[in-house]
Amino acid sequence: MPATPAWPPKSLPRLYVETPLEAGARVNLDAAQANYLGNVMRLKEGDRLLVFDGMSGEWLAEIAEAGKKRMTLSVTEPTRPQEAAPDLWLAFAPVKKGRVDWLVEKAVELGVARLLPVVTQRTIVDKLNLDRMRAHIIEAAEQCGRTALADIDEPVRLDAFLKQRDTGRTLYFADETGGEQAAVTFKAGPALILTGPEGGFTSEEAATIRSARNTTAVSLGPRILRAETAALAAVAAWMSAAGDWR
């Protein structure tokens, strides 16, 4: 006897929308979304897809109206509740375009709740296109099944970051010169990971970070990691030791 297929199928297209979702809600898509569903995915009136708004979990929706540059969805029923995302923030020194896009995308996939770009003495990129970063955040959430969107802050200099941070949130400093083993040091609870730029932190910066309140220096192993690799390795290690991979 064949197994009963799961409903809704995981293969359904998945889309982030800004309209608050509830049963019976009507969602008017913008031209880009309508083009994607109609011309790329070849969906038409009556076809179904999954939608989420970042706050209300995931819902099943049906295409109620479809035109060349417009589309209206009718929301029918919830499929998954809002995720309980781990309370992990990632502060990172921006790297070159392309690599920073990849970093943001993968951090979202790993479950980071907030991204904080931090400008250090050796940071070679001090400006970010936050609109492009937010687009990558949305696309990553659509692809990986998240129901929450990660926030991203405006870039700040390291000294301002250290002054403004909530010292009640543990700061894990990924120090390339050495620290406690990450796998046994990461603890459950609100956390903030800080990783450096290409070339690393200066000795003065490292000393200042180490002396900051509620800060623990951690080691990410014996090998030299690229800036974006270090950021994602730290996130993966935290998720495994203290996050929702346990």
Image: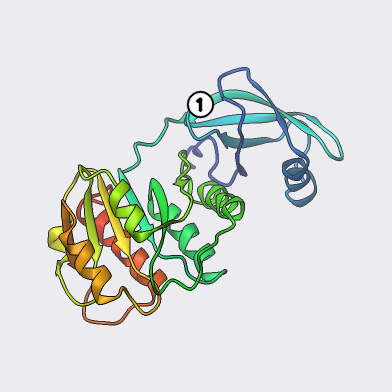
Of 96 and 58, which appears nearest the observer?
A: 96
Which residue is painted at 47% across and 48% down in the image?
Answer: 152
Residue occupying the far top of the picture: 24
Q: Secondary structure at mark 1?
A: strand
Of 98 and 168, which appears nearest the observer?
A: 168
Which residue is painted at 72% across and 42% down in the image?
Answer: 33
173 horizontally vs 149: left or right:
left
- Residue 182 in sight from this viewpoint: no
Vertical arrangement, residue 213 with respect to residue 43, above or below:
below
Q: How many marks?
A: 1
| Quarter where residue 219 is shown | bottom left
- Residue 235 in sight from this viewpoint: yes
148 horizontally vs 25: left or right:
left
Vertical arrangement, residue 66 with respect to residue 157, above or below:
above
The residue at which mark 1 appears reads as 78
128 horizontally vs 207: left or right:
right
171 horizontally vs 44: left or right:
left
